[in-house]
């Protein structure tokens, strides 16, 4: 805890020197067992780089990613690596992926990439793979087993047979609220790979899974959803400490299902409303989430942000550092066995901007 | 001659008015009428949905639906309201124009533009069932 506080002070000092009090990245600190094994990593997600024409891109979204990368490079202590959580592009084309990759190439750290649906559905991840590597894989780092899943797959019929062109397929999946879309899934062959991968890991080893979509069912209408979530959760069940960190939802979410803690990260591009604010939806929303503040559109980067995460006990403590808002800390409470907001969890502590309607 | 034409015209108009009055009464309409009117309304809602998801509304390809899926987080029931960032009371359509100008980098619409009416119709339709709360922040 002391080291964490120290590093946090250093970080804030450096960030302050850069005239920025908040960063749209996640810094993750992991400290399992031995002191020497403590390390941090950063998490940046959902940049949605959007091509207009020629060399023109949507300025707003560019600024979000540029800021994240620049500020991640100032982190102290330096993170061991960076996770990019998916949706680097808006419509999956080379211009967007190249432009995004060029911006991310300025990161001083090794970067692991998660596939988002906006990266995938034009060419089924072919060009993305040339730039960033395999669609799913795992790696071990200082005593932690990390899994990167491609959770945005869907049925073969939808993917290969329903649409006359790849461009139309991409556009249909790019619309969050498009009824022509299709539920995300990890899929049978990747689940088979995951089972084999996890079989090799000791059950006392902390496991952290990165996915783009939540590996849980929140609201199908906006694909805050993974169709085979239960199957993947069952594979994580034998582990004493399992955490899923996901993008896609562009908002603060956290929940606990059995032994698995779930944490969403912010987007660098724009925020999304909570499903409960759609009057025609009847979502089953995780009840322990205290929402982020309602976005103020007059502040371009409001309701985007970054998170500081430490997992000293094998569970995530996530500090959300938010543009134009007060920071939030969500940590695992061993007494209640679930992630809770340190300040706002009690209904009596909630503030008016957290009310969404 | 002129008087005769005038008399004939007036007589014809009176007959026409009586016939119309027998056929159409302002306070009477059928289920079929209601269905037709609703269909007319829904065609405008559909037009609004098209504009909402269109990359053509602004100049940078950004669509309203990118930030507002199903027009959520637009709070139409709270307008007109004091828009604290602007320091005055505005209507929903003023805020639609603000979004067209800023995130969409486009040109604002005339307040009575059929496109504006269509977008309002769509926003309201997605928000149906929610109680009016004018002035609520």
Image (cartoon, coloured by chain):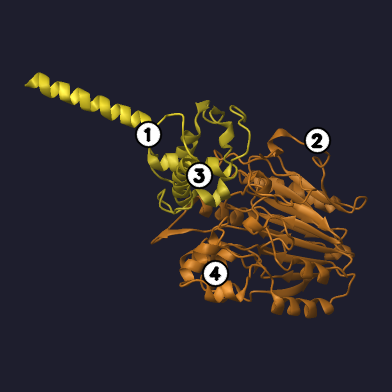
Residue drawn at (90%, 70%) of the image? A204
Task: Report the disc number at residue A349.
Answer: 2
Query: Which chain is in orange here?
Result: A
Colour in which chain B is drawn? yellow
- Residues at marks 1 and 2, common chain? no
Between tags 3 and 1, which lies in front? 1
The kind of secondary structure element at disc 4 is: loop
Query: Label 4, label 3: how many angstroms apart (C-alpha)?
Result: 28 Å
A170 in relation to A299, above or below: below
Of tags 4 and 1, the one toward the viewer is 1
**For the residues marked 4 and 2, what is the alpha-carbon distance in whole angstroms?**
43 Å
Q: Which mark is residue A121?
A: 4
Q: Residues within 10 Å of mark 3 (few under 14, many from 20)?
A: many
Residue with the mark numbered 1: B23
Q: Is residue A41 visible?
A: no
Residue A323 vertical position relative to residue A146 in the rendered view, above or below: above
Q: Is residue A306 above or below residue A225?
A: above
Q: Are marks 2 and 3 in contact (CB under 8 Å)?
A: no
Q: Chain of mark 1?
A: B
List x then y, in percent, for residue A247.
67, 59
Q: Quadrant of residue A39?
A: bottom right
């Amino acid at each position: 805890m002391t080291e964490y506080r120290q590093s946090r002070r250093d970080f804030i000092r450096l960030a302050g020197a850069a005239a920025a009090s908040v960063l749209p990245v996640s810094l993750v600190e992991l400290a399992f067992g031995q002191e020497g094994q403590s390390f941090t990593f950063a998490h940046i997600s959902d940049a949605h780089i959007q091509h207009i024409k020629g060399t023109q891109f949507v300025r707003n979204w560019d600024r979000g990613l540029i800021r994240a990368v620049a500020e991640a490079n100032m982190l102290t202590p330096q993170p061991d690596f960076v996770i990019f959580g998916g949706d680097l592009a808006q419509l999956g084309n080379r211009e967007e992926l190249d432009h995004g990759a060029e911006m991310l190439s300025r990161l001083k750290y090794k970067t692991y990439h998660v596939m988002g649906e906006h990266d995938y559905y034009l060419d089924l991840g072919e060009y993305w793979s040339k730039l960033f590597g395999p669609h799913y894989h795992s790696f071990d780092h200082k005593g932690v087993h990390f899994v990167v899943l491609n959770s945005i797959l869907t049925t073969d019929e939808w993917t290969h047979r329903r649409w006359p062109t790849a461009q139309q397929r991409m556009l249909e999946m790019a619309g969050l609220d498009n009824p022509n879309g299709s539920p995300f899934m990890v899929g049978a062959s990747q689940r088979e790979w995951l089972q084999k991968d996890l079989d090799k890991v000791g059950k006392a080893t902390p496991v952290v899974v990165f996915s783009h979509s939540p590996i849980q069912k929140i609201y199908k209408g906006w694909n805050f959803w993974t169709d085979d979530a239960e199957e993947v959760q069952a594979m994580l069940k034998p582990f004493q400490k399992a955490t899923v960190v996901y993008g896609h939802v562009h908002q603060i979410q956290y929940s606990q299902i059995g032994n698995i803690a779930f944490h969403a990260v912010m987007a660098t591009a724009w925020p999304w409303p909570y499903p409960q604010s759609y009057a025609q939806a009847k979502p089953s929303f995780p009840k322990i989430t205290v929402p982020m503040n309602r976005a103020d559109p007059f502040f371009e980067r409001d309701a985007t942000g970054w998170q500081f995460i430490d997992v000293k006990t094998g569970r995530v403590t996530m500090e959300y550092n938010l543009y134009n808002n007060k920071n939030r800390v969500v940590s695992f409470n061993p007494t209640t066995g679930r992630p809770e907001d340190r300040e706002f969890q009690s209904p009596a502590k909630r503030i008016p901007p957290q009310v969404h309607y | 001659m002129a008087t005769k034409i005038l008399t004939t015209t007036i007589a014809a108009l009176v007959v026409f008015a009586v016939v119309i009055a027998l056929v159409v009464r302002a306070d009477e309409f059928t289920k079929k009428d209601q269905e037709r009117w609703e269909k007319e309304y829904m065609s405008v809602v559909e037009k609004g949905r098209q504009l909402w998801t269109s990359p053509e509304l602004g100049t940078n390809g950004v669509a309203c639906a990118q930030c507002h899926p199903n027009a959520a987080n637009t709070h139409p029931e709270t307008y007109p309201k004091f828009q604290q960032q602007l320091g005055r009371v505005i209507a929903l359509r003023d805020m639609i124009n603000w979004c067209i100008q800023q995130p969409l980098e486009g040109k604002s619409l005339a307040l009575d533009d059929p496109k504006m009416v269509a977008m309002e119709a769509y926003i309201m339709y997605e928000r149906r069932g929610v109680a009016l709360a004018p002035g609520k922040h």
